[in-house]
Image: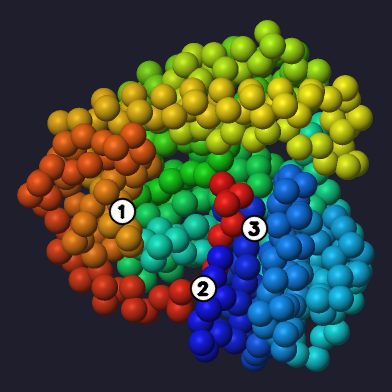
Amino acid sequence: MSHNEPQPRDVEVLTFGCRLNLVESEAIRRAALAQGRTNLIVINTCAVTAEAVRQSRQAIRRIKRERPGAEIVVTGCAAQINPLEFGAMPEVDGIIGNAEKADPSSWAKERRHGTEVPDIFSAPPAPRTLPEGIEDRTRAFLAVQTGCDHRCTFCIIPFARGPSRSVPPSEVLEGVARLVGTGFKEIVLTGVDLTSYGSDLGDGPELGTLVRSILRSTPRLERLRLSSIDCIEADAELFDAFADEPRLMPHLHLSLQSGDDLVLKRMKRRHSRRDAIEFCQELRRRRPDIVFGADVIAGFPTESEVMFENTHSIVEDCGLTHLHVFPFSARPGTPAAKMPPVAPEIIRERAKRLRIAGEAALRAHLCAQTGKVLRVLTERGGIGRTEDFTRVRISDTPPSRMIDVTIAGNDGKLLEVAAKSILNADQSNTEDAILVKPPEPAWHNSPLLA
């Protein structure tokens, strides 16, 4: 995170947490700029772990030291849950709740920002805007859903985001068409509980139907990708879409959390170990090139060594490639915080073992790509992404180009391209298309960004 620009932007947004927060940060920035705000720094907080909250507070203090004249307004999940805690900080000029942070009127110059936020469970039935964000000037994110109707025992997020609310399909299709028209080749659908999309829209479509509609209505869209999903909620149409739609990218990140049935029950998850394994097997049968990532928690309360081994082994049993490991962090106000804890040193040791398993799985996947010709979308910094979201090191190629490359090997983290192997480079005038997009947001991403 850097604040060394000699001429700071009129509105800067410091983002912690998930991709949805990242997307909403762009909506915040645009809304505040539209209201003519200047010298404003917004802290978009995360509440998923105590460490995320600590980092937000630390950043606020540091920013005030570096920019004493700037106005600091705090929003996001941690601010929604603990507005008084952030409002009591002398560095903070105001708090804005999660349900209102993308509303332009919230950022009007004349508005006084207090330390109270509206009840998130009284939020509008659907998001007031369709937040969209940009990553590396290459892929665009559309937030089509927010909130969650479930109550996992370790999770505080429903109390920060409120009930599940979906963006109507017509607005999603308009947003996709707008982004494709400005030159984006890849769009990622995101949300808090993406597979619950449409549950609040009466007879509205499920996620699979939305995916089909997007691909049917925008033939110029080259890649459609989904962010994290809950395997037990995936609808039949989504399975069919992965089998039939080559433009739906063969990569899914699963919210698994554990591989042990008793731990899953104590977490109040809705899937079993067998559900997760069969989900991966069935999708792999329909789409053999699909790659899975997953979130897993190490050291959930009451987790024994045998229970942990069930989680450790699910990396292989599900064929996971990209693993996000979270050492358990008790959140005050959640049922898990009252359960018998696992010793911190055991949590750290189990998290380390899971990360080692994840690294080994990634290396195996990377090695299996050697000699293949893969389609890659280039990004800034000499990096590209394959269809299954694997990173490729590519030099001397502008961002937002679709190219075919031959894979020569890997360094354990990224694929390496064979010399002079770039084939069929997309020669469309991508750079001109990029110029009509809004200015790139002043995002600063914390290490907690998932």
Q: Percent x, y for residue 328?
A: 73, 33
Picture disc at residue 16: 3
In the image, 94: left or right of 108? Answer: right
Say which label, 3 or 1, has the lower sequence index.
3
Q: Percent x, y for residue 159?
A: 83, 49
In this view, 19 is above or below 228: below
In the image, 19: left or right of 74? Answer: left
Q: Which amino acid type is shown beneath numbered disc 1?
A: Ile
Picture disc at residue 383: 1
Q: CA distance from mark 1 to mark 2?
A: 20 Å
Q: Which residue is mark 2?
A: 441
Q: Secondary structure at mark 3?
A: loop
Residue for point 37% across, 55% down? 186
Q: Percent x, y for residue 338?
A: 91, 30
Q: Nearer the viewer, mark 1 or mark 2?
A: 1
In the image, 330: left or right of 38? Answer: right
Q: Which amino acid type is shown beneath numbered disc 2?
A: Pro
Q: Percent x, y for residue 259?
A: 63, 18
In this view, 284 is above or below 198: above
Q: Nearer the viewer, mark 2 or mark 3?
A: 3
Residue for point 69% across, 11% down? 305
Q: Secondary structure at mark 1?
A: strand
Q: CA distance from mark 2 to mark 3?
A: 14 Å
- The picture quadrant where one finds residue 37 is bottom right
Label 3 neighbourhood size at 10 Å, few (<14), some (14-19), many (20+)?
Answer: many
Q: Secondary structure at mark 2?
A: loop
Say which label, 2 or 3, has the lower sequence index.
3
- Image quarter hosting the N terminus: bottom right
State if disc 1 and disc 3 touch (CB < 8 Å). no
Q: How many numbered markers are drawn?
A: 3
Label 1 neighbourhood size at 10 Å, few (<14), some (14-19), many (20+)?
Answer: some
